[in-house]
Amino acid sequence: MLNETAIAALKFELRGELIEPGNAKYDAARKVYNAMIDRKPRLIVRCADVADVIAAVKFSRQHKLPLSVRGGGHNAAGSGVCDDGLVIDLSPINYVRVDPKKRTVLVGGGALWGDVDHATHAFDLAVPAGIISTTGVGGLTLGGGIGHLTRQCGLTVDNLLAVDMVLADGRFVTANAKENSDLFWAVRGGGGNYGIVTSFLFKAHPILTNYAGPMLWPMEDATEILRWYRGVIAKAPNALNGFFAFLTVPPGPPFPEHLHNKKMCGIVWCYTGPLKHAEQVFKPIRKFKAPALDLVGPIPHPAMQSMFDALYPPGHQWYWKADFIRQLSDEAIALHVKHGAMLPTMQSTMHLYPINGKARSVKNSATPWSYRDATWAGVIVGVDPNPANKEKISRWARDYWDALHPYSAGGAYVNFMMDEGEDRVRATYGKNYNRLAKIKKRYDPTNLFRVNQNIVPAK
Ligand SMILES: Cc1cc2nc3c(=O)[nH]c(=O)nc-3n(C[C@H](O)[C@H](O)[C@H](O)COP(=O)(O)OP(=O)(O)OC[C@H]3O[C@@H](n4cnc5c(N)ncnc54)[C@H](O)[C@@H]3O)c2cc1C
């Protein structure tokens, strides 16, 4: 039974903080990035180190407390936090150590991508991440990891060399290609289902200054741009990434006043080849149709990685819908243009992230990520600071998704999904699901780690 004596004993065991309801820090500590999520845990353990993680896992098992693991707190479904349970908050474990000779980076399980970019940039190196620097390394990596470097370097998991983990029974293990290789396979896309990663070892790439940024066109040109873009991205060299977006131009610098609050379409490019070749690479792109705004140019990698942070601070309402897409037919493009033109609020958006290039060179069965043969991970997000607009942004995203889902490949990227149930998780992992379920049974037979896109242990 959970009583004050047991809680006091846990507190005594920890180096980090134990936060309970009534504590002045409780409300801030239970908040996650998506303000639609409002959960009230019984205890929050801010882990200072691996020993704290082990103590918290054992406590949760002993007292049959539901458990959630929090990295950066960005998850769409808010799976870093749970009601009436124990939150294992890894945010203090955020060290980053770069080995410039080996070109590897050791990252604490609670670090944010901004921490990694800051540390690696000093050595002219980078690890492929997402497009917002406040996202957690933990959740993004364990789900796969898509971003500006996907076509150049593959998914984030394709650059993962090893993890240290605390398992459901409290054991501490290392998993890599040689040691606990089944576990290492499962964590490269299987999410937080297998245990708590206390450190990640990544391969880093020599990336310093990109030729990158957004190009925007009027909404009236969206059909033409999308038809052209699908061909461009199919043939582009791996050094060129570009995701498509419907967006509303923010009313402030660096955007010119005449474009403020205009709904537009755009491509956010990122070229990592030699800078001396960049203008040449972009010549045909600029020639196809002169953009209404062209912000593409040389930019330090960490600046690219944090370019959209200010537009998306924590605390907004977020409603997510997603799908993998193999082909964009003219019919699907027409529906995209129809729904894209109805963006309900300034921050709502639709992105098509290419997952071809280097990411495609990995087999579907080599990691749990089973849509390597898709061309895009699509995501529709209704976003707004005002809770009164929750229904409006959710309805727009659902209507948009309902119209386009029949043209999709079936599943969706786990990190772009909210809580959509077991069938959807199965569709996402496809043929890899059964193998994941068997490994889950081996390492977490009682499904202790279940506040996530859950893989049910095999029978
Ligand atoms: C604004 C925004 C932009 C985004 N952009 C991208 C993008 O460009 N590319 C992309 O791929 N994704 C992107 N995402 C999605 C992001 O990858 C997921 O939201 C991811 O779950 C966030 O990880 P986190 O650690 O911040 O989240 P959390 O909510 O803390 O955790 C998410 C899940 O991972 C588990 N987890 C986290 N850390 C660990 C750990 N160390 N060990 C075990 N389990 C752990 C948690 O238990 C939880 O189930 C974006 C999300 C947001 C909100």
Image: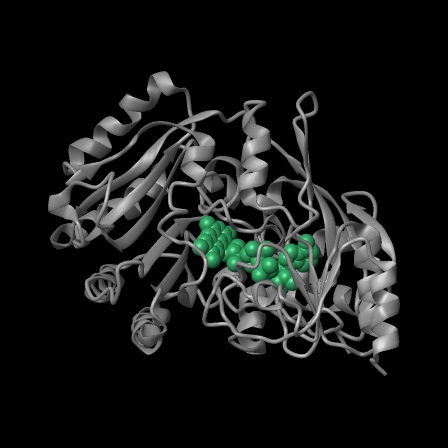
Spot occupied by residue 48 in the image (x, y as percentages of width and height): 76, 51
**What residue is shown at x 73% (from left), y 53% (from top)?**
197
**What residue is shown at x 14% (from left), y 36% (from top)?**
290
Give the residue at the far top of this rendering: 276
* Residue 17 position by quadrant: bottom right
Q: Which is more toward the observer, 134 or 244?
A: 134
Q: Which is more toward the observer, 84 or 267?
A: 84
**What residue is shown at x 17% (from left), y 45% (from top)?**
217
Q: Quick one: quadrant of the N terminus?
A: bottom right
**What residue is shown at x 35% (from left), y 64% (from top)?**
385
Spot occupied by residue 191 in the image (x, y as percentages of width and height): 64, 60
Residue 337 in view: yes
Give the residue at the far bottom of this rendering: 1
* Colour pattern of the rendering: one colour
Using the image, determine if residue 402 lies above or below residue 191: below
86 left or right, relative to 359: right
Residue 190 in view: no
Report the label total: 0
Q: Quadrant of ligand 1?
A: bottom right
63 left or right, relative to 404: right
121 left or right, relative to 322: right
